[in-house]
């Protein structure tokens, strides 16, 4: 499933190809993906693409006609660009062509992704975005504001981090890795975390996401321009998917454990990650 770093990379790719261009055609190959395609897609023809942004895992394509096209990749959604000579592929559901001869193709085998259209002015109150918490790199998110949020949460810190109403875009991998780097046991109730540990955790969340975005950026050409597939990020995990493997801390000597929290696997080191 594409996580925040992958979506960020896709957003940069779309922005590079489409910002400033004018829409010349919009085409769908079926009535729906996860949701029905919105009406009014053809009204986008003639509108200029003024910018492309990410909010949580939503791709926001802003247009000069006061509308924003929302694209969500779901589980298996892929974006590829075709310059002239489009050759249809199985599971191509949505195409947007521009006057610079680029066509953006949305392909989704499992069809959990979707495309929607909102008035730009009403975007933040739309059904997709209204409930979303802080962006991880938002300047307003600091140890202070995070502590305030956590103080209300009796849930384990791992579940707190995965809840998009608190902070968006911290997927399972990143939550596990950030907790390991911070030496925090995943079952620690969020409200009991000290301010010092909270600051450390926030620093590590950003560090890991930055690293993943950087790694994704380096494979941008490969996946967005050539085959549309999402490359795997080239960094090794300390705990994620390493059950029974030796802890990467050379002074530790313990093995990584796996537990299930809120239906998701959590990987952690029982020695390096104490309750904090
Ligand atoms: Zn360890």
Image: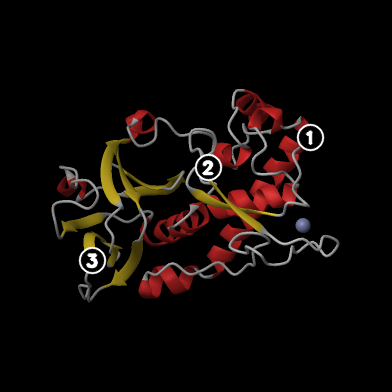
Where is mark 2, residue-wise?
A: 162
Q: CA distance from mark 2 to mark 3?
A: 30 Å
User: Residue 154, image x and y in percent?
Assistant: 60, 27
Where is mark 1, residue-wise?
A: 196
Q: Write the residue at 60% across / 48% down.
A: 175
C-beta proximity under 8 Å, tags 1 and 3 = no
Where is mark 3, residue-wise?
A: 91
Q: Quadrant of residue 102?
A: bottom left
Quarter of the N terminus within the rendering? bottom left
Q: Earlier in the sequence, mark 1 or mark 3?
A: 3
Q: Nearer the viewer, residue 11 or 35?
A: 35
Q: Earlier in the sequence, mark 2 or mark 3?
A: 3
Q: Within 10 angstroms of label 3, few (less than 14), some, or many (20 or more) residues?
A: some
User: Residue 22, image x and y in percent?
Assistant: 27, 54
Q: Quadrant of residue 160?
A: top right
C-beta proximity under 8 Å, tags 2 and 3 = no
Q: Write the residue at 42% across / 31% down.
A: 131
Q: How is the image coloured?
A: secondary structure
C-beta proximity under 8 Å, tags 1 and 2 = no
């Amino acid at each position: 499933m594409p996580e925040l770093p992958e979506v960020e990379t896709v957003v940069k790719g779309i922005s590079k190809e489409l910002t400033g261009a004018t829409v010349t055609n919009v085409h769908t190959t079926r009535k729906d993906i996860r949701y029905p395609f919105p009406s009014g897609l053809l009204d986008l023809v003639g509108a200029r693409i003024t910018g492309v942004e990410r909010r949580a895992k939503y791709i926001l394509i802003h247009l000069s006609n006061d509308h924003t096209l929302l694209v969500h990749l779901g589980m298996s959604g892929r974006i590829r660009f075709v310059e002239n000579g489009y050759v249809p592929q199985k599971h191509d559901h949505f195409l947007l062509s521009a006057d610079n001869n680029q066509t953006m193709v949305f392909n989704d085998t499992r069809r959990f992704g979707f495309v929607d259209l909102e008035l730009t002015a009403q975007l933040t109150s739309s059904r997709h975005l209204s409930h979303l918490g802080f962006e991880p790199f938002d300047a307003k998110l600091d140890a202070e504001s995070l502590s305030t949020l956590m103080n209300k949460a009796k849930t384990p810190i791992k579940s707190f981090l995965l809840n998009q109403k608190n902070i968006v875009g911290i997927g399972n991998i990143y939550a596990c890795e950030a907790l390991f780097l911070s030496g925090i046991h995943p079952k620690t109730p969020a409200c009991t975390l000290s301010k010092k540990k909270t600051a450390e955790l926030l620093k590590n969340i950003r560090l890991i996401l930055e690293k993943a975005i950087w790694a994704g950026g380096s494979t941008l050409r490969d996946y967005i321009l050539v085959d549309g597939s999402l490359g795997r990020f080239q960094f090794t995990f300390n705990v994620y998917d390493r059950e029974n493997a030796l802890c990467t801390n050379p002074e530790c000597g313990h093995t990584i454990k796996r537990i299930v929290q809120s239906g998701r696997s959590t990987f952690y080191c029982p020695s390096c990650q104490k309750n904090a």
